[in-house]
Amino acid sequence: MTRHGRVVAEGSVKKLAPRLLMPVDVPTEYSGNVAQGSAPGVNKMASTSALISSPDFRQEVLRRGGETAARCYQCATCSAVCELAPAEAPFPRRQMLWTQWGLVDRLAADPSVWLCHQCNDCTTHCPRDARPGDILQVVRGLVVEGLAFPQALGRLVANARTTWPILFGVPLLFWIALLGAMGQLQSPADFHAYDQIVPHVVLYSVFFPLSGLVMLAAFVSGWRYWRMMGVAAPRAKSFLSGIWATGVDIATHKRFGKCGTARFRRLGHLLLFWGFVGAAVTSGLLIVAIYLQGYELPLPLLHPYKLLGNVSAVALVVGAGILVVVRITDRDRAGASNAFDSFFATVVGLVIATGILVELARVFNPEVPVAAVGLYVLHLGVVTTLFVTFPYSKFAHMLYRTLAMVHEQAAAPPSGG
Amino acid sequence: MERVGVFTCTGCGIGEALDIEALHAAAEDPKPTCTASHPCLCAPEGMDSVRKAVDEEKLEGVILAACSHRAKRQELQLDRAATMVERVSLREQVVWSHPPNEEDTQMLAEDLLLMGMAKVTRAKAAIPISETIESGVLVVGGGVAGLEAARGASGLGHQVVLVEKEDTLGGRTRDLRYQTPARPPYDTLVPSGLPDLVAAVQDDPQIRVLTGARVKSIRGQPGQFSVEVETPSGVESFKSGAIVQATGARPYDATKLGHLGYGSSSNVITSHELEAMLSRGELGRPSDGKLPSRVVFIQCAGSRDPEHLAYCSSECCGVTLRQMAAIHKDHPGVETATIYKDMRTGGQLERFYQAVQTQPGSLFTRGEVSAVEGNGNLKVHLKESLLGDDVSLDAELVVLAVGMVPNSADGEAIRALRDARVRSEKGDSEIQKKEALKVVEELKHNEGTEILNLDYRQGPDLPVLRYGFPDSHFICFPYETRRTGIYAAGTLRAPMDGAQAAEDGWGAAMKAAQCIEEARHGEAVHPRSGDVGVPDFFLQRCTQCKRCTEECPFGTLNEDEKGTPQLNALRCRRCGICMGACPERIISFPDYSVDSTAAAIKAMSVPDEFDEKPRILALLCENDALPALDAAALARTQWNPWVRVVPLRCLGSLNLVWIADALSRGIDGVILIGCKHGDDYQCHYVKGSELANTRLGNLQETLTRLAVEPERVKIVELAHDESDRIPQLLDEFADELEELGASPLKGF
């Protein structure tokens, strides 16, 4: 073990470094053996021979609205009030300290950052208004950006505050150009179904490859993250061993339920989650309906597939509505909104709104197909934005939080000592 | 005093609980000139009736048998100089604390009245000192506290002489560019206010500033100090009424901080050295003059460390915050990091702390510095940091926030040194000379440290407490020192920051003004403020044992060559410690003497053994124990009716003859309740309760010889707020005595 030995999770930290402006020569050592002591979170990290803070990282935190982190004086009220923090590795006090010091590698490899559901109990109890809940959100944004593949896309989404016209515009223009070239941008006579405008085969040929690319990008980021966590805190069990419990937890939002003060937000999120699952299942079933069952589109309103789709839509609307109401009425708990946050919220909102309008336009207003066509193209545009930005926007919490939860399940039991 | 009137108040339940006529009838020997009762003595009509009686009956003294002497002071006042007033506490000590209309309660009231009568008839009228009193104030030290004291005293109408040893005013903070904010929102540096303060003092026609000057000698007493000051243009002599010493503090010697890298690397500097750089506007590393990219501050450098300064200097956190903010302001881009044990930011400084914390480029972290390594570029190693690991921090400049050491002189040690030197030359025996030389060696470091050069028998400077801060009562009367009329202010008195030192200067100035005013009326200063009686020494019988001159906590007494005490009455605080010290019992106050208290003790009834009414004498310190007893009475707590309370000005005024008298009369036990003594003493007169303890130790032996159980005399420490404890103490003592049985001396 050399004194200034390189970090084992070399790749990930090095990749993080350029964007997060962390000095690359951080002489941090990760040794395999666990230092004797109390908190496993730190023990398993390493014995650190020397550290220097990264003011640039702190600048970056500052730029993203995390200036309050500096106020923290480590009283640990936050860790004490947090319902989610495990007793053997409480957060977010330690994460606040790492943020102050700019220990980006520790933050990036720490699952606690993602185990937080930002109920902001810590923020409301903080005696110095350091807003730990918001800081963790900022850190999550930094992690998403730092682990992004390819880097450029991560940077583009991270800067949504200024780049949003590109993020929305390019997919939209793509669809307009594609459909224009195919000569489909016109009101069909006798409008009754959307495959008159965009044949399903076109959808498949765009979305299937796109999904593949997105999955690949997400996989690369996820793989980096998984390795970083594993190096920082070796796991006793495999990935698969933790997957079932995590799946159950996600399906029921059980862990989120511990955030007593965020119960409305949890309800909203649960509805949104199942709404999306429902919508995805509906899409799958439609393919089954068309190609295996030979149905003609559109399906009748009372068809079970149609019903599932509509119930999902209602869940999405109600869920999103609850989240919006919570955000507006309880600003303190909702936390400070930053671009990372609001970009994703906007995309989801637009997907839901345009999706529903598209359906309503067809059912109630088939006489004016121009409106329906316009809305449909818009819908395709925002859905594409949602797809493409998945690994880079707040949507990526699906990936990282899931991995963090699986890691927690698979983690070695806390060493006695 | 022969013509004494007794006036009993029947209000507050006294009339219902006692037989007033029987009470008055009990006072037979000596018999009062007149007796009267009033339903409400504290009403204007009540006291008018007393005044009328004083005039008609030509009374020299009156007994107001009403409430405690601590209550209704204003309402129950008479012209002090003309008539002596003795208060008998029927309300607190009798009716509020004992069952009404019982034989024992009535006996208690009667005893208290008899004891009061005994005291008054043996008292003499106090004649106030009337001498020429100077109203000028001498301020020693021209730092923030001294400047503010000068301005304060001038504002109160006094002529001020300000003596500063340096050539310019301003003290330690002379060259500061910025100071921490004193106004809302308390988050930005402000320009130093010192130039304005210095200008205000220099422009004040009532203040004479002597720079480059030192105090050569101070003689006399409050209101009459004769001062000689050595200035560059010769010695100046003038009179002064009171003195404020504000000689400030100096930084702790950083050469002792080698473990923090001081001395081994030139890039490790103290906060004072950094201050000098910042005030010149040139922040650079001493090694190469380069602007450091990161400055690391180490808080508590040598402070709160038993090996160096055991105390917190209280200003260093603020100094570091100010310096960090100044660096951020004048040298943007330079990072600062502060390693602290605890950030201590009193008052509004907390807001400034938050502001500096959020300035980009600042980092605060808790930790213990284990070593500072390197020469040019430094590495600061931390242990027990919050990160949970041993961590090190790169630094280009390390600043040690060192604490402060008061610029005081240990007056008592200097005197001991001088005495030992004399003994070592003119000692009686070789052994004595050798011993004296040892003392000289031990105290030699005090040589030449004199500041005030007082002509006092107990030493040329203020006595100091632990760590060299002048001894005073830290909580109750902070500016007070053990030399009446000399007040300590600023960092000399206690570690503090500039804002506190400014306030301190004003506080001391006000105490000085008050002292001069009281001297003008011949009155004592706190805590017996307003007392005009001064001790009388019957010198024909003095044996020159020097106990009084040694034991007076306030250096009141000087000595002539033979060792005869010479009184400086205006220095006296009337505690009576000299009275307790004197083996010949030749010291007495007009209204407080060995004789008068002994008479009071003799006046109480001592029923014989078969009555089964034991008697307990309780000698209570009137500053702490008595208020506690009053508070217990206010809460209507009951205590044993055999107890008879005699308040003492200080337990240190205790003369052992009182205890001997009491026991020989057959009183079953004596309990003495005084203040806490030791390092954290609470005695208003500093050493009183401690002295009483020592004296009592000598008594125990005598008791055994007299075949009296030593357990019959007990001394207890009690704080002002222990009102719940004091009735318990009395009851427990009564139980203990009951177990011992009746005094063997009863009936002799």
Image: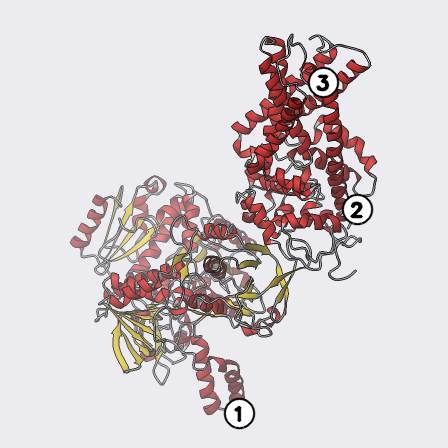
Nearer to us in this view, B439 or B725 = B439
Whether pointer 3 and pointer 1 mark residues with C-beta atoms closer than 8 Å, the reply is no
Disc 1, SS: helix
| Total marks placed | 3
Tell me if residue B575 can be seen: no
Tell me which corner region of the image, top left, top right, bottom left or bottom right, holds residue A189: top right
Q: Which residue is mark 2?
A: A234
Q: Which residue is mark 3?
A: A199
What's the chain of the residue with tag 2?
A
Whether pointer 2 and pointer 3 mark residues with C-beta atoms closer than 8 Å, the reply is no
In this rendering, which labeled residue sits more in front, label 1 or label 2?
A: 2
Q: Residues within 10 Å of mark 3 (few under 14, many from 20)?
A: few
Earlier-in-chain disc, 2 versus 3: 3
Q: Is residue B684 left or right of residue B284?
A: left
Nearer to us in this view, B183 or A272 = A272
Which residue ends up furthest to the left in the rendered image? B56
Q: x%, y% of residue A344? A: 61, 31
Q: x%, y% of residue B3? A: 23, 58
Q: Residues within 10 Å of mark 2 (few under 14, many from 20)?
A: some
Q: Quadrant of the N terminus of chain B?
A: bottom left
Q: Is residue B743 above or below residue A90?
A: below
Whether pointer 1 and pointer 2 mark residues with C-beta atoms closer than 8 Å, the reply is no
Tell me if residue B347 can be seen: yes
What's the chain of the residue with tag 1?
B
Q: Is residue B511 above or below residue A315?
A: below
Q: Amino acid at mark 3?
A: Pro
Q: Confirm whether circles 3 and 1 share one chain.
A: no
Q: Which residue is mark 1?
A: B430
Q: Amino acid at mark 1?
A: Glu
Nearer to us in this view, A161 or B553 = A161
Q: Amino acid at mark 2?
A: Pro
